[in-house]
Amino acid sequence: MNPMTRRKLILGSAATVAGVGGLAAADRLAKRYGLIPPDGSGIYGPGETLSYACQRILTTRTPAREFSRDMISKNPFANAVAPPNDAFKQLQAGGFKDWRLVVDGTVARPMSFSLADLKALGLHSQITEVACEEGWSYIAEWIGTPLSNVLREAGVLPQTQYVVYTSNEEDAWESIDLQDASDPHTLLTMGMNDGDLPVPFGGPLRLRLPRQLGYKSLKYINRITATDNIKKFGKGLGGVDPEYGYAWYAGI
Amino acid sequence: MRATHWLTLIAFLALFITGSLIVISHPRFYWGEVGNVNTKPLFVIPIPASRDTVPTGYKYEMPDENGWSRALHFEAAWVAVLVGMVYGIYGLWSGHFRKDLIPARCDWNLRAFRDRMAKYLRRAPPDPAEERSYNVLQRTAYVVVIFVLFPLMIWTGLAMSPTFTAAFPLTAALLGGRQSARTIHFLVTWLLVLFLFVHVAMVAMSGFRNRMRAMITGYNRDREESR
Protein backbone atom coordinates (compact mmCIF):
# COMPACT_ATOMS: atom_id res chain seq x y z
CA MET A 1 0.00 0.00 0.00
CA ASN A 2 1.57 3.30 -1.02
CA PRO A 3 1.33 6.35 1.27
CA MET A 4 -1.16 8.07 -1.04
CA THR A 5 -3.79 5.34 -0.70
CA ARG A 6 -3.13 5.00 3.03
CA ARG A 7 -3.80 8.69 3.51
CA LYS A 8 -6.95 8.37 1.43
CA LEU A 9 -8.06 5.40 3.53
CA ILE A 10 -7.56 7.28 6.79
CA LEU A 11 -9.32 10.38 5.43
CA GLY A 12 -12.15 8.26 4.06
CA SER A 13 -12.65 6.43 7.37
CA ALA A 14 -12.59 9.70 9.27
CA ALA A 15 -15.21 11.14 6.91
CA THR A 16 -17.37 8.04 7.32
CA VAL A 17 -17.17 8.18 11.13
CA ALA A 18 -17.98 11.91 11.05
CA GLY A 19 -20.87 11.25 8.67
CA VAL A 20 -22.40 8.50 10.79
CA GLY A 21 -21.92 10.60 13.92
CA GLY A 22 -23.54 13.56 12.21
CA LEU A 23 -26.48 11.45 11.12
CA ALA A 24 -26.98 10.12 14.64
CA ALA A 25 -26.89 13.65 16.05
CA ALA A 26 -29.34 14.85 13.38
CA ASP A 27 -31.64 11.95 14.22
CA ARG A 28 -31.62 12.87 17.94
CA LEU A 29 -32.31 16.53 17.18
CA ALA A 30 -35.09 15.67 14.72
CA LYS A 31 -36.77 13.38 17.27
CA ARG A 32 -36.53 16.05 19.95
CA TYR A 33 -38.14 18.77 17.81
CA GLY A 34 -40.78 16.50 16.25
CA LEU A 35 -39.28 16.59 12.75
CA ILE A 36 -39.79 12.91 11.97
CA PRO A 37 -43.10 12.12 10.24
CA PRO A 38 -45.20 9.11 11.35
CA ASP A 39 -44.13 7.28 8.16
CA GLY A 40 -40.47 8.27 8.54
CA SER A 41 -39.10 4.73 8.63
CA GLY A 42 -38.33 2.10 6.01
CA ILE A 43 -36.37 2.61 2.80
CA TYR A 44 -38.08 5.88 1.94
CA GLY A 45 -37.93 7.14 5.54
CA PRO A 46 -34.81 9.29 5.06
CA GLY A 47 -36.34 11.08 2.05
CA GLU A 48 -39.69 11.66 3.78
CA THR A 49 -37.96 12.88 6.93
CA LEU A 50 -35.63 15.25 5.07
CA SER A 51 -38.54 16.78 3.13
CA TYR A 52 -40.74 17.16 6.20
CA ALA A 53 -38.00 18.47 8.50
CA CYS A 54 -36.58 20.93 5.96
CA GLN A 55 -39.97 22.29 4.97
CA ARG A 56 -41.01 22.60 8.63
CA ILE A 57 -37.82 24.52 9.47
CA LEU A 58 -37.92 26.68 6.32
CA THR A 59 -41.62 27.49 6.30
CA THR A 60 -42.63 27.91 9.92
CA ARG A 61 -45.58 30.28 10.15
CA THR A 62 -45.76 31.18 6.48
CA PRO A 63 -49.31 31.69 5.21
CA ALA A 64 -50.83 29.67 2.38
CA ARG A 65 -50.46 30.96 -1.16
CA GLU A 66 -53.58 32.97 -2.02
CA PHE A 67 -54.75 34.18 -5.41
CA SER A 68 -56.79 37.05 -6.76
CA ARG A 69 -60.51 36.59 -7.48
CA ASP A 70 -60.01 36.67 -11.25
CA MET A 71 -57.79 33.59 -11.03
CA ILE A 72 -60.64 31.37 -9.76
CA SER A 73 -60.99 28.42 -12.17
CA LYS A 74 -64.10 28.53 -14.34
CA ASN A 75 -64.24 24.74 -14.63
CA PRO A 76 -62.82 23.15 -11.49
CA PHE A 77 -62.39 19.39 -11.55
CA ALA A 78 -64.01 17.43 -8.72
CA ASN A 79 -62.06 14.19 -9.32
CA ALA A 80 -63.54 10.74 -8.84
CA VAL A 81 -65.65 10.23 -5.74
CA ALA A 82 -66.64 6.92 -4.18
CA PRO A 83 -70.42 6.40 -4.41
CA PRO A 84 -72.00 7.76 -1.21
CA ASN A 85 -73.13 5.19 1.34
CA ASP A 86 -76.72 4.91 2.65
CA ALA A 87 -76.02 6.96 5.76
CA PHE A 88 -74.69 9.78 3.57
CA LYS A 89 -77.67 9.61 1.20
CA GLN A 90 -80.05 9.86 4.16
CA LEU A 91 -78.26 12.93 5.52
CA GLN A 92 -78.22 14.44 2.03
CA ALA A 93 -82.00 13.93 1.69
CA GLY A 94 -82.42 15.95 4.88
CA GLY A 95 -80.29 18.79 3.49
CA PHE A 96 -77.42 17.78 5.83
CA LYS A 97 -79.36 19.29 8.78
CA ASP A 98 -78.38 16.24 10.86
CA TRP A 99 -74.71 16.18 9.75
CA ARG A 100 -72.55 16.09 12.85
CA LEU A 101 -68.86 16.69 13.33
CA VAL A 102 -67.68 14.77 16.38
CA VAL A 103 -64.59 16.14 18.19
CA ASP A 104 -62.92 13.81 20.68
CA GLY A 105 -59.57 12.39 21.81
CA THR A 106 -57.18 14.43 23.92
CA VAL A 107 -59.56 17.36 24.41
CA ALA A 108 -61.01 18.78 27.64
CA ARG A 109 -64.59 18.81 26.32
CA PRO A 110 -65.48 16.13 23.72
CA MET A 111 -68.36 17.56 21.72
CA SER A 112 -70.17 17.53 18.39
CA PHE A 113 -71.13 20.31 15.98
CA SER A 114 -73.89 20.73 13.43
CA LEU A 115 -73.08 22.71 10.28
CA ALA A 116 -74.97 25.66 11.82
CA ASP A 117 -72.81 25.38 14.98
CA LEU A 118 -69.68 25.49 12.82
CA LYS A 119 -70.91 28.54 10.91
CA ALA A 120 -71.60 30.26 14.23
CA LEU A 121 -67.87 29.95 15.09
CA GLY A 122 -67.14 32.54 12.39
CA LEU A 123 -66.62 32.12 8.65
CA HIS A 124 -63.41 32.82 6.76
CA SER A 125 -62.79 32.80 3.05
CA GLN A 126 -59.62 32.05 1.11
CA ILE A 127 -58.81 31.72 -2.58
CA THR A 128 -56.35 28.83 -2.78
CA GLU A 129 -55.26 26.13 -5.18
CA VAL A 130 -56.03 22.43 -5.00
CA ALA A 131 -53.00 20.59 -6.38
CA CYS A 132 -53.40 16.87 -6.94
CA GLU A 133 -50.43 14.52 -6.69
CA GLU A 134 -51.31 13.39 -10.24
CA GLY A 135 -50.28 16.83 -11.51
CA TRP A 136 -53.49 18.76 -12.19
CA SER A 137 -54.80 21.71 -10.20
CA TYR A 138 -57.51 24.36 -9.89
CA ILE A 139 -58.16 27.49 -7.87
CA ALA A 140 -61.38 28.14 -5.94
CA GLU A 141 -62.69 30.29 -3.15
CA TRP A 142 -63.24 28.23 -0.02
CA ILE A 143 -65.48 29.40 2.82
CA GLY A 144 -65.52 27.82 6.25
CA THR A 145 -64.35 28.00 9.82
CA PRO A 146 -60.71 27.40 10.75
CA LEU A 147 -60.08 24.02 12.38
CA SER A 148 -58.35 25.92 15.18
CA ASN A 149 -61.73 27.43 16.21
CA VAL A 150 -63.19 23.96 16.69
CA LEU A 151 -60.12 22.77 18.58
CA ARG A 152 -60.30 25.83 20.85
CA GLU A 153 -63.97 25.12 21.65
CA ALA A 154 -63.14 21.55 22.61
CA GLY A 155 -60.01 22.57 24.55
CA VAL A 156 -57.04 20.66 23.13
CA LEU A 157 -54.95 19.16 25.95
CA PRO A 158 -51.23 19.99 26.09
CA GLN A 159 -50.02 16.44 25.35
CA THR A 160 -51.67 16.54 21.90
CA GLN A 161 -49.29 15.95 18.97
CA TYR A 162 -51.50 15.15 15.99
CA VAL A 163 -55.05 15.76 14.85
CA VAL A 164 -56.71 12.82 13.08
CA TYR A 165 -59.68 13.48 10.79
CA THR A 166 -62.08 10.91 9.43
CA SER A 167 -64.42 10.94 6.45
CA ASN A 168 -67.83 9.49 5.87
CA GLU A 169 -66.15 7.77 2.91
CA GLU A 170 -65.24 4.17 3.73
CA ASP A 171 -61.86 3.83 5.52
CA ALA A 172 -60.76 7.35 4.67
CA TRP A 173 -58.78 9.05 7.43
CA GLU A 174 -55.75 11.29 7.60
CA SER A 175 -53.83 13.29 10.19
CA ILE A 176 -51.83 16.49 10.50
CA ASP A 177 -49.37 17.86 13.03
CA LEU A 178 -50.25 20.72 15.38
CA GLN A 179 -48.58 23.32 13.18
CA ASP A 180 -50.97 22.58 10.33
CA ALA A 181 -53.92 22.08 12.69
CA SER A 182 -53.49 25.53 14.23
CA ASP A 183 -52.83 27.28 10.90
CA PRO A 184 -55.68 29.74 10.17
CA HIS A 185 -55.72 28.49 6.56
CA THR A 186 -56.63 24.95 7.62
CA LEU A 187 -60.31 25.37 6.98
CA LEU A 188 -63.37 23.21 7.74
CA THR A 189 -64.96 24.20 4.45
CA MET A 190 -68.72 24.47 3.91
CA GLY A 191 -68.84 26.87 0.94
CA MET A 192 -67.14 27.12 -2.42
CA ASN A 193 -67.19 30.08 -4.83
CA ASP A 194 -70.06 31.88 -3.04
CA GLY A 195 -72.34 28.81 -2.83
CA ASP A 196 -72.68 25.74 -0.62
CA LEU A 197 -69.81 23.27 -1.09
CA PRO A 198 -71.12 20.84 -3.75
CA VAL A 199 -71.08 17.14 -2.84
CA PRO A 200 -68.56 16.16 -5.60
CA PHE A 201 -66.14 18.72 -4.13
CA GLY A 202 -66.58 17.34 -0.61
CA GLY A 203 -69.79 18.93 0.66
CA PRO A 204 -71.15 19.35 3.20
CA LEU A 205 -67.79 19.50 5.02
CA ARG A 206 -64.25 19.23 3.66
CA LEU A 207 -61.00 19.89 5.48
CA ARG A 208 -59.01 22.19 3.19
CA LEU A 209 -55.26 22.10 3.75
CA PRO A 210 -53.90 24.43 1.06
CA ARG A 211 -50.22 23.91 1.91
CA GLN A 212 -50.43 20.18 1.15
CA LEU A 213 -51.46 18.14 -1.89
CA GLY A 214 -55.13 17.44 -2.57
CA TYR A 215 -55.27 13.97 -1.06
CA LYS A 216 -54.82 15.47 2.42
CA SER A 217 -57.94 17.63 1.92
CA LEU A 218 -60.41 14.87 2.79
CA LYS A 219 -64.05 15.18 1.77
CA TYR A 220 -67.11 14.50 3.99
CA ILE A 221 -65.42 15.08 7.35
CA ASN A 222 -67.41 13.74 10.31
CA ARG A 223 -64.85 13.22 13.08
CA ILE A 224 -61.84 15.07 14.47
CA THR A 225 -59.70 13.23 17.02
CA ALA A 226 -56.83 14.89 18.85
CA THR A 227 -54.15 12.44 19.95
CA ASP A 228 -50.82 12.15 21.70
CA ASN A 229 -50.00 8.87 19.97
CA ILE A 230 -50.50 8.51 16.22
CA LYS A 231 -49.31 4.89 16.35
CA LYS A 232 -52.70 3.87 17.80
CA PHE A 233 -54.46 4.64 14.51
CA GLY A 234 -54.59 2.14 11.67
CA LYS A 235 -51.11 0.82 10.89
CA GLY A 236 -49.55 3.73 12.74
CA LEU A 237 -48.46 5.60 9.63
CA GLY A 238 -50.72 8.59 10.23
CA GLY A 239 -53.32 8.03 7.53
CA VAL A 240 -54.83 5.67 5.03
CA ASP A 241 -52.82 7.14 2.13
CA PRO A 242 -49.45 6.31 3.75
CA GLU A 243 -50.72 2.73 4.02
CA TYR A 244 -50.86 2.73 0.21
CA GLY A 245 -47.34 4.16 -0.06
CA TYR A 246 -48.22 7.87 -0.28
CA ALA A 247 -46.34 10.33 1.90
CA TRP A 248 -48.01 11.32 5.15
CA TYR A 249 -46.53 14.77 4.71
CA ALA A 250 -47.83 16.00 1.37
CA GLY A 251 -46.33 19.48 1.42
CA ILE A 252 -44.01 18.48 -1.41
CA MET B 1 -15.24 13.67 -7.42
CA ARG B 2 -15.69 10.49 -9.49
CA ALA B 3 -18.06 9.11 -6.83
CA THR B 4 -20.33 12.14 -7.28
CA HIS B 5 -20.56 11.36 -11.01
CA TRP B 6 -21.78 7.80 -10.43
CA LEU B 7 -24.09 8.70 -7.53
CA THR B 8 -25.62 11.38 -9.76
CA LEU B 9 -26.13 8.81 -12.50
CA ILE B 10 -27.92 6.44 -10.10
CA ALA B 11 -30.09 9.28 -8.75
CA PHE B 12 -30.83 10.49 -12.28
CA LEU B 13 -31.93 7.06 -13.47
CA ALA B 14 -34.18 6.66 -10.38
CA LEU B 15 -35.61 10.15 -10.96
CA PHE B 16 -36.21 9.46 -14.66
CA ILE B 17 -37.97 6.14 -14.12
CA THR B 18 -40.14 7.30 -11.21
CA GLY B 19 -40.82 10.62 -12.92
CA SER B 20 -42.08 8.79 -15.99
CA LEU B 21 -44.34 6.63 -13.82
CA ILE B 22 -45.75 9.75 -12.12
CA VAL B 23 -46.40 11.46 -15.49
CA ILE B 24 -48.48 8.47 -16.59
CA SER B 25 -51.12 9.37 -13.99
CA HIS B 26 -51.78 12.61 -15.88
CA PRO B 27 -50.06 12.72 -19.29
CA ARG B 28 -51.41 16.20 -20.06
CA PHE B 29 -49.39 19.41 -19.81
CA TYR B 30 -50.53 22.98 -19.33
CA TRP B 31 -49.15 26.51 -19.17
CA GLY B 32 -49.92 28.94 -16.33
CA GLU B 33 -50.96 28.36 -12.76
CA VAL B 34 -53.78 25.83 -13.13
CA GLY B 35 -54.71 23.01 -15.46
CA ASN B 36 -56.93 19.93 -15.27
CA VAL B 37 -59.03 17.70 -17.52
CA ASN B 38 -61.56 20.54 -17.87
CA THR B 39 -58.99 23.00 -19.25
CA LYS B 40 -57.21 23.12 -22.59
CA PRO B 41 -53.81 21.41 -22.47
CA LEU B 42 -50.63 22.81 -24.01
CA PHE B 43 -49.85 19.30 -25.27
CA VAL B 44 -50.82 15.73 -24.49
CA ILE B 45 -48.61 12.64 -24.59
CA PRO B 46 -50.63 10.09 -26.57
CA ILE B 47 -50.38 7.24 -24.06
CA PRO B 48 -52.95 5.58 -21.77
CA ALA B 49 -53.11 7.01 -18.23
CA SER B 50 -52.91 5.17 -14.93
CA ARG B 51 -56.06 6.94 -13.65
CA ASP B 52 -59.53 6.51 -15.15
CA THR B 53 -60.37 10.22 -14.68
CA VAL B 54 -58.07 11.26 -17.55
CA PRO B 55 -59.72 11.10 -20.99
CA THR B 56 -56.97 9.60 -23.16
CA GLY B 57 -59.10 7.90 -25.80
CA TYR B 58 -57.71 4.51 -24.75
CA LYS B 59 -59.87 1.88 -23.07
CA TYR B 60 -56.76 0.54 -21.37
CA GLU B 61 -55.60 1.82 -18.00
CA MET B 62 -51.92 1.62 -17.02
CA PRO B 63 -50.93 0.21 -13.63
CA ASP B 64 -50.83 2.94 -10.99
CA GLU B 65 -47.38 3.15 -9.38
CA ASN B 66 -47.55 6.65 -7.93
CA GLY B 67 -47.17 5.73 -4.24
CA TRP B 68 -43.64 4.30 -4.21
CA SER B 69 -42.67 6.30 -7.32
CA ARG B 70 -43.23 9.58 -5.53
CA ALA B 71 -41.37 8.38 -2.43
CA LEU B 72 -38.37 7.21 -4.46
CA HIS B 73 -38.49 10.33 -6.68
CA PHE B 74 -38.08 12.64 -3.69
CA GLU B 75 -35.49 10.44 -2.00
CA ALA B 76 -33.44 10.32 -5.22
CA ALA B 77 -33.88 14.09 -5.55
CA TRP B 78 -32.35 14.47 -2.09
CA VAL B 79 -29.40 12.28 -3.11
CA ALA B 80 -28.92 14.36 -6.27
CA VAL B 81 -29.09 17.65 -4.37
CA LEU B 82 -26.74 16.55 -1.55
CA VAL B 83 -24.26 15.03 -4.01
CA GLY B 84 -24.55 18.19 -6.10
CA MET B 85 -23.64 20.29 -3.06
CA VAL B 86 -20.54 18.19 -2.38
CA TYR B 87 -19.58 18.43 -6.07
CA GLY B 88 -20.24 22.18 -6.15
CA ILE B 89 -18.15 22.90 -3.07
CA TYR B 90 -15.32 20.66 -4.27
CA GLY B 91 -15.48 22.09 -7.79
CA LEU B 92 -15.12 25.64 -6.51
CA TRP B 93 -12.50 24.80 -3.93
CA SER B 94 -10.29 22.69 -6.21
CA GLY B 95 -10.57 25.04 -9.18
CA HIS B 96 -12.08 22.23 -11.28
CA PHE B 97 -14.81 24.52 -12.59
CA ARG B 98 -12.37 27.28 -13.49
CA LYS B 99 -9.69 25.04 -14.97
CA ASP B 100 -11.74 22.36 -16.69
CA LEU B 101 -15.31 23.54 -17.23
CA ILE B 102 -15.51 27.24 -18.01
CA PRO B 103 -14.50 27.58 -21.68
CA ALA B 104 -11.30 29.56 -22.27
CA ARG B 105 -11.83 33.24 -23.10
CA CYS B 106 -10.55 32.81 -26.63
CA ASP B 107 -13.21 30.12 -27.22
CA TRP B 108 -16.18 32.37 -26.42
CA ASN B 109 -17.19 32.69 -30.05
CA LEU B 110 -19.08 30.81 -32.68
CA ARG B 111 -15.98 30.04 -34.72
CA ALA B 112 -14.44 27.97 -31.88
CA PHE B 113 -17.63 25.92 -31.69
CA ARG B 114 -17.74 25.45 -35.46
CA ASP B 115 -14.08 24.48 -35.70
CA ARG B 116 -14.34 21.90 -32.94
CA MET B 117 -17.55 20.50 -34.44
CA ALA B 118 -15.85 20.19 -37.84
CA LYS B 119 -13.04 18.31 -36.14
CA TYR B 120 -15.53 15.88 -34.61
CA LEU B 121 -17.11 15.35 -38.01
CA ARG B 122 -13.70 14.64 -39.56
CA ARG B 123 -13.09 12.31 -36.59
CA ALA B 124 -9.73 13.99 -36.14
CA PRO B 125 -7.66 12.89 -33.11
CA PRO B 126 -7.81 15.23 -30.08
CA ASP B 127 -5.19 17.96 -29.51
CA PRO B 128 -2.54 17.35 -26.85
CA ALA B 129 -4.37 19.87 -24.61
CA GLU B 130 -7.56 17.86 -24.91
CA GLU B 131 -5.82 14.78 -23.58
CA ARG B 132 -5.72 16.49 -20.22
CA SER B 133 -8.91 18.53 -20.20
CA TYR B 134 -12.11 19.18 -22.15
CA ASN B 135 -12.55 21.02 -25.43
CA VAL B 136 -14.93 23.93 -25.93
CA LEU B 137 -17.93 21.81 -26.94
CA GLN B 138 -17.51 19.46 -24.01
CA ARG B 139 -17.05 22.39 -21.63
CA THR B 140 -20.16 24.12 -22.94
CA ALA B 141 -22.26 20.96 -22.68
CA TYR B 142 -21.09 20.30 -19.11
CA VAL B 143 -21.58 23.92 -18.05
CA VAL B 144 -25.12 23.95 -19.46
CA VAL B 145 -26.02 20.66 -17.75
CA ILE B 146 -24.38 21.47 -14.40
CA PHE B 147 -25.20 25.16 -14.05
CA VAL B 148 -28.41 25.53 -16.08
CA LEU B 149 -30.35 22.28 -16.48
CA PHE B 150 -29.77 20.71 -13.04
CA PRO B 151 -30.61 23.95 -11.18
CA LEU B 152 -33.66 24.38 -13.42
CA MET B 153 -34.85 20.87 -12.48
CA ILE B 154 -34.49 21.70 -8.78
CA TRP B 155 -36.23 25.04 -9.21
CA THR B 156 -39.18 23.66 -11.22
CA GLY B 157 -39.44 20.74 -8.79
CA LEU B 158 -39.68 23.07 -5.82
CA ALA B 159 -42.18 25.23 -7.72
CA MET B 160 -44.57 22.26 -7.62
CA SER B 161 -44.38 21.93 -3.83
CA PRO B 162 -47.43 23.54 -2.20
CA THR B 163 -45.58 24.24 1.06
CA PHE B 164 -42.44 25.61 -0.60
CA THR B 165 -44.43 27.92 -2.89
CA ALA B 166 -46.51 29.06 0.08
CA ALA B 167 -43.30 30.27 1.71
CA PHE B 168 -41.67 31.48 -1.53
CA PRO B 169 -44.47 32.27 -4.03
CA LEU B 170 -42.02 33.70 -6.58
CA THR B 171 -40.56 30.22 -7.19
CA ALA B 172 -43.75 29.39 -9.09
CA ALA B 173 -44.80 32.88 -10.18
CA LEU B 174 -41.53 33.65 -12.00
CA LEU B 175 -42.01 30.57 -14.17
CA GLY B 176 -45.57 31.54 -15.08
CA GLY B 177 -47.22 29.30 -12.48
CA ARG B 178 -47.36 25.81 -11.10
CA GLN B 179 -48.38 24.12 -14.36
CA SER B 180 -45.69 25.96 -16.33
CA ALA B 181 -43.17 24.65 -13.79
CA ARG B 182 -44.44 21.10 -14.32
CA THR B 183 -44.19 21.47 -18.10
CA ILE B 184 -40.63 22.87 -17.92
CA HIS B 185 -39.66 20.07 -15.49
CA PHE B 186 -40.88 17.57 -18.09
CA LEU B 187 -39.15 19.22 -21.07
CA VAL B 188 -35.80 19.68 -19.29
CA THR B 189 -35.91 15.97 -18.42
CA TRP B 190 -35.67 15.22 -22.15
CA LEU B 191 -32.77 17.65 -22.59
CA LEU B 192 -30.94 15.75 -19.84
CA VAL B 193 -31.76 12.42 -21.48
CA LEU B 194 -30.45 13.83 -24.77
CA PHE B 195 -27.23 14.85 -23.00
CA LEU B 196 -26.95 11.38 -21.48
CA PHE B 197 -27.21 9.72 -24.90
CA VAL B 198 -24.64 12.03 -26.55
CA HIS B 199 -22.36 11.74 -23.52
CA VAL B 200 -22.43 7.92 -23.61
CA ALA B 201 -22.00 7.90 -27.40
CA MET B 202 -18.89 10.11 -27.10
CA VAL B 203 -17.43 7.86 -24.42
CA ALA B 204 -18.09 4.87 -26.63
CA MET B 205 -16.41 6.53 -29.62
CA SER B 206 -13.29 7.45 -27.66
CA GLY B 207 -12.74 3.85 -26.61
CA PHE B 208 -15.36 2.64 -24.17
CA ARG B 209 -13.24 0.37 -21.97
CA ASN B 210 -10.38 2.79 -21.62
CA ARG B 211 -12.66 5.74 -20.82
CA MET B 212 -14.70 3.68 -18.36
CA ARG B 213 -11.56 2.62 -16.55
CA ALA B 214 -10.54 6.27 -16.27
CA MET B 215 -14.01 7.37 -15.14
CA ILE B 216 -14.22 4.70 -12.45
CA THR B 217 -10.64 4.40 -11.20
CA GLY B 218 -9.26 7.81 -12.13
CA TYR B 219 -6.29 6.19 -13.89
CA ASN B 220 -5.59 6.71 -17.54
CA ARG B 221 -3.69 3.92 -19.25
CA ASP B 222 -1.59 6.35 -21.26
CA ARG B 223 -0.50 8.41 -18.26
CA GLU B 224 -0.17 6.43 -15.08
CA GLU B 225 -1.11 9.24 -12.76
CA SER B 226 -4.07 9.98 -10.57
CA ARG B 227 -6.35 12.93 -11.21
Image (cartoon, rainbow, N blue to C red):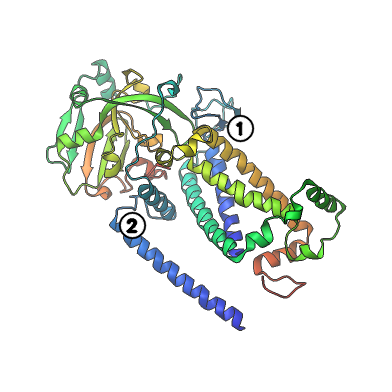
B156 over B107 or under it: above or below: above
Q: Could you confirm whether marks 1 and 2 are on the same chain?
A: no
User: Left or right: B48 with respect to B201?
Assistant: left
Picture quarter with the C terminus of chain A: top left
Residue assigned mark 2? A30
Residue assigned mark 1? B47
Q: Amino acid at mark 1?
A: Ile
A165 over A123 or under it: above or below: below
Q: Position of residue B171 (x, y in %)?
A: 48, 39
Q: Amino acid at mark 2?
A: Ala
- The mark closer to the camera, 1 or 2, is 2
Chain bearing tag 2 is A
B67 over B35 or under it: above or below: below
Q: Nearer the viewer, residue A206 or B151?
A: B151
Q: Nearer the viewer, residue B45 or B117?
A: B117
- Secondary structure beneath dot 2 equals helix
Q: Position of residue B36 (x, y in %)?
A: 50, 27
* Quadrant of res A100: top left
Q: Position of residue A6 (x, y in %)?
A: 56, 81
